[in-house]
Image (tube, rainbow, N blue to C red):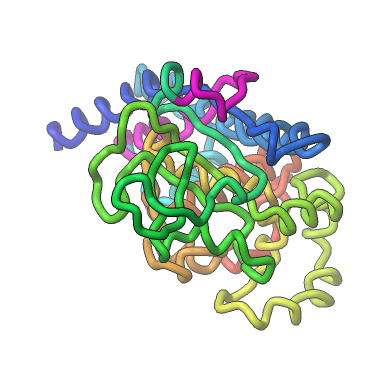
Amino acid sequence: MRIGIVLLYLQYIAGVLGAGRYVIDRISCSGSLYNSVKGYMDTVQQWATDICTPLEPYIQDPTPANRPDETFMNLVVRLFGKDDLPTLMNLYSRFDPMRQYVLVDVDNRSEWWKNSEREQSDLELFCNPDYIIWKNSPVDGSATWWDPTRYCPIKNDNMILDLKLPSTHLLAVSCPAVIDGNQERWPVRWSETITFQPQKLQRTIDKDVTFNAKRVQKAAAPSLFSRIKHKFKRTDKDFKPVDLLDTTEMTLVHEISHLVTCGASMDMRGDRSYGWTNVNELKSAENAENLAYFAMINQLNKNYQLDVKYDGAFVSLN
């Protein structure tokens, strides 16, 4: 047990020290897209701050006086199964780097940035996958999908290629700093990336699929859920009222949590890792969707005095 706590503490320290910078690609995220993506990042970083702020005093000095309040700890138990110190340190080590990212306004496609400045802990955000091109590999001459921002081939089963299809269900895909298929860290000058599917990103902007008071009010209305539930019968998840708040910000928390800098979470059961029903079954900080729901519901608790019952319905905290 003592060894486990020491390892978690080292992970916590790594989280504190491992934060990097983020860049929004100005070519793919041109015009108003740049400010939209920055707005999503601002929200995600505030969510991460709202998690780390109550955790930090208790992690530094785990006395009853420093313990986060009951509502917060109940949420920890609901989504991660327990609220012991290693669990809280694990959560802090994932969300602290997320809140520490600093925006830098540079040309991320310049040779200076790619070859001299960027690091593994940096994050680049793209608003479409057009930078992934089909060409002859400079390595062996064979035709392949190629990522010129990192000078590396893209395997045909890489999910980022799905973003080139308007019919995809994916809004965004992350590329953590590991080589495909194993845990070897990639070269020091390769950043981590998150890429959006352009049509779906524009649709979420046009329809204002953001986490705000108006959306929370609509999601909490039983009549709305009854009217739209049929739209989700084509999915493989048991759709619940809280799933109406699966917004762009939640997607971004999910994808950032996959990054090595933020703890390298997984989709533990593939497609059955998503949605309220599945996160309740998994109860793991290793699952990206659990982290995303935790961040979102903490906002419901904190700013809207709402909580979520086991069945996914909303309940007032008052």
The residue drawn where x is 50% and y is 23% is 111
Q: Quadrant of residue 167?
A: bottom right
The residue drawn where x is 65% and y is 49% is 128
Q: Is residue 85 left or right of residue 135?
A: left
Measuring from the top left, give residue 144's x and y in whole percent: 42, 58
- Name above or below for residue 224 compared with residue 100: below
The residue drawn where x is 75% and y is 81% is 230
Measuring from the top left, give residue 25's x and y in whole percent: 64, 33
- Image quadrant holding the C terminus, namely top right
Question: Does the magenta stretch mainly form a helix, a strand or a loop?
Answer: helix
116 or 315: nearer the eye? 116
- Image quadrant holding the N terminus, namely top left
Which stretch did the figure color magenta? Answer: 85-114
Q: Is residue 135 magenta?
A: no
Q: Is residue 244 left or right of residue 272?
A: right
The residue drawn where x is 54% and y is 43% is 194
Badge count: 0
Evaluate whether residue 159 shows in this view: yes
Q: Is residue 102 magenta?
A: yes
Q: Quadrant of residue 118?
A: top left
Measuring from the top left, give residue 199's x and y in whole percent: 74, 58
